[in-house]
């Protein structure tokens, strides 16, 4: 590929996950030009992973004959954004105060590095190139193994006092509900995440019986039942699955209603399970939001599935690879 | 009073309430120089009230020999800030789409007019001159007849998509709790406002008996019992009052915990009842917040009583009398 006279500005994106890591090169318009992936390798020292990622990045840069204007790193939180540190995220054992920012600044001198937790980074990507385009106030929720979130307020990614803002999955929607993995009771995550959906389906199989459900085969192996199975059964019209997804969607909508009352966004973008389940989850979520928020705020707020699909993680890293997270960038 | 060679820039503040209205002149540093008050007069046409306020304002301006650089109007919501309209607030019957902004712009040509709901305006005043000075992220809650709120995020008053942001009193903290005046169930206002405190005390008088409480005299006239009585009894150590305030404070802290998880503020400023009750309400609120929010976010967030006292409403109007609501103003 020849270098053009006027090259398109590109960015380097690095996505650090518990299972795999990816390096990609993308444009400021959100197009991925090249991408490479490696297993993270449980127990490997962070330095070794970072070395391998830097090598991959150099190879991609050489192949594409580009000079990235910025590097964006998307990673599970908590992290210290200002100091570029990854702070012991649950999915990355051993990454304790790991200076990812300083490492990459040394590896790519002169190229600014931005670090962001993955939910915030995905929020930014969905806002720039996905389901939140054009909104001034957007809330992003991942509905996966956990429920994370990111807030775009007044046309900027909002971080709060010490980068803890946007933990929408860990505000209470069910004070008498189940314990959450985080140690608190009744968090939105505890009643509307993937594991919560699987657990609710298991419980219904146990208590309601399993006569007329396609999920009956899981009765002897409840531990294998996942939200994905429930969503699949739901799409086929299975009444138990539909009911479980309706309940999770209702909780989701109650949580979103709280966000609508507090933040009055134009759009709430929901990723992962909501994308696959569609109206099985988003239908009850929309109804619950309308019932639990005031009409003037609820009426102007759309609840939509995330739009970036499996490009979301790469684009998340590309989205933050810029000095300014604001509307002008 | 002589006009100085270099006059201090002043602003005109107008506070429109359901019972009374006030006009004041204040400085950009939050000092009130002059003030006049009138009864709103139930049923009076809004135009008559506005005419009287404009006349009062002209008199104050003449007396103080000043030229205000801006006019701020603080009023119960809902309102259309951009278009300067008051939109049928519950405390102002007959004020339906009342063009307060246009009226004052015509009465004081060339002076910019800013309209803001009273909770937002008070949030701005507490942030500029009260308990929130220096914070980049501050949440204000009034704990009075209702629970209103205002959000200072990233050093600016946050309005949301259509001026509905900050309704922190109407997010759900008790899904099985009492109905709220707003028509929803279990709002923070329904369990922690003044009327909620009075109702909880009445119910305890009814169910727990009234042997050892100084509030026993209210058993024959429950309708007279107010939050003020409960706070007074609480300060005197009355166990029933202390318990009721503890419960309301706990709900308040649970609501604040949700805000901490979502918005990660440095400080939450609580007005009205919390100011009078002090640690009787703020003690349990702080404990509940610490129990229902993550340590990293809870640990950097203070819960403090509002500081402006009876100057709050005047200063609220003065605070918004400026083109920019941001940190630079």
Image (spheres, coloured by chain):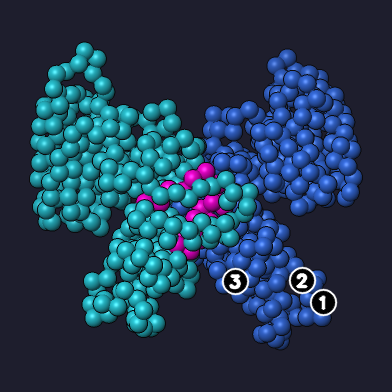
Chain colours: A cyan, B blue
Residue B148 located left or right of residue B103:
left
Badge 3 and badge 1 in a common chain: yes
Q: Nearer the viewer, residue B295 or A37?
A: A37
Asked if residue A23 can be seen in this view, the reply is: yes
Q: Secondary structure at mark 3?
A: loop
What percent of the width, then of the height, locates residue B107?
A: 82, 26
Q: Which residue is mark 1?
A: B221
Q: Nearer the viewer, mark 3 or mark 1?
A: 3
Q: Quadrant of residue A193?
A: bottom left
Q: CA distance from mark 1 to mark 2?
A: 7 Å
Q: Residue A182 bears which disc, if any?
A: none
What percent of the width, then of the height, locates residue B57?
A: 83, 31
Name the residue: 53% across, 61% down: A288
Label 1 close to label 2 by CB (< 8 Å):
yes
For the record, the magenta segment spans A249-271
Q: Which residue is mark 3?
A: B177
Q: Quadrant of residue B62?
A: top right
Asked if residue B283 can be seen in this view, the reply is: no
Q: Secondary structure at mark 2?
A: loop
Q: Main secondary structure of the magenta part?
A: helix
Q: Characterize the local packing of mark 1: few (<14), some (14-19) or many (20 or more) Cα atoms within 10 angstroms.
A: few
Residue A149 located left or right of residue B229:
left
Q: Secondary structure at mark 1?
A: loop
Q: CA distance from mark 3 to mark 2?
A: 21 Å
Residue A264 colored magenta?
Answer: yes
Q: Nearer the viewer, residue A109 or B105?
A: B105
Q: Which residue is mark 2?
A: B225
Residue B207 colored magenta?
Answer: no
Quarter that holds the N terminus of chain A? top left
Q: Earlier in the sequence, mark 3 or mark 2?
A: 3
């Amino acid at each position: 590929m020849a270098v053009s006279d006027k090259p398109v500005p590109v960015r380097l994106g690095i996505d650090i996950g518990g299972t795999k890591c990816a390096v990609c090169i993308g444009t400021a318009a959100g197009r991925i030009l090249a991408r490479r992936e490696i297993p993270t390798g449980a127990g490997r020292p962070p330095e070794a992973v970072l070395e391998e990622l830097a090598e991959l990045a150099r190879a991609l840069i050489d192949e594409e004959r580009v000079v990235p204007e910025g590097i964006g790193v998307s990673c599970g939180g908590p992290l210290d954004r200002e100091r570029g540190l990854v702070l012991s995220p649950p999915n990355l054992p051993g990454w304790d105060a790991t200076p990812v920012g300083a490492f990459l600044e040394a590896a790519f001198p002169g190229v600014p590095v931005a670090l962001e937790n993955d939910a915030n980074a995905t929020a930014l990507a969905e806002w720039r190139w996905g389901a939140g385009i054009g909104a001034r106030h957007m809330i992003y929720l991942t509905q996966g193994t956990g429920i994370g979130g990111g807030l775009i307020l007044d046309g900027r990614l909002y971080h709060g006092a010490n980068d803890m803002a946007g933990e929408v999955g860990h505000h209470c929607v069910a004070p008498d509900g189940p314990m959450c993995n985080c140690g608190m009771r009744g968090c939105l995550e505890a009643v509307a995440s993937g594991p919560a959906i699987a657990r609710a389906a298991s419980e219904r199989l146990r208590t309601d019986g399993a006569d007329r459900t396609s999920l009956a085969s899981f009765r002897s192996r409840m531990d294998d039942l996942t939200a994905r199975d429930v969503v699949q059964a739901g799409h086929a019209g299975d009444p138990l699955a539909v009911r479980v997804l309706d309940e999770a969607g209702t909780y989701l909508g109650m949580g979103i209603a709280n966000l609508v009352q507090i933040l009055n966004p134009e759009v709430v973008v929901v990723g992962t399970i909501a994308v696959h389940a569609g109206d099985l989850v988003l239908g009850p979520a929309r109804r619950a939001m309308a019932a639990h928020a005031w009409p003037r705020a609820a009426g102007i707020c759309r609840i939509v599935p995330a739009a970036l699909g499996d490009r979301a993680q790469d684009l998340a890293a590309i989205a933050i690879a810029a000095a300014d997270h604001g509307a002008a960038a």
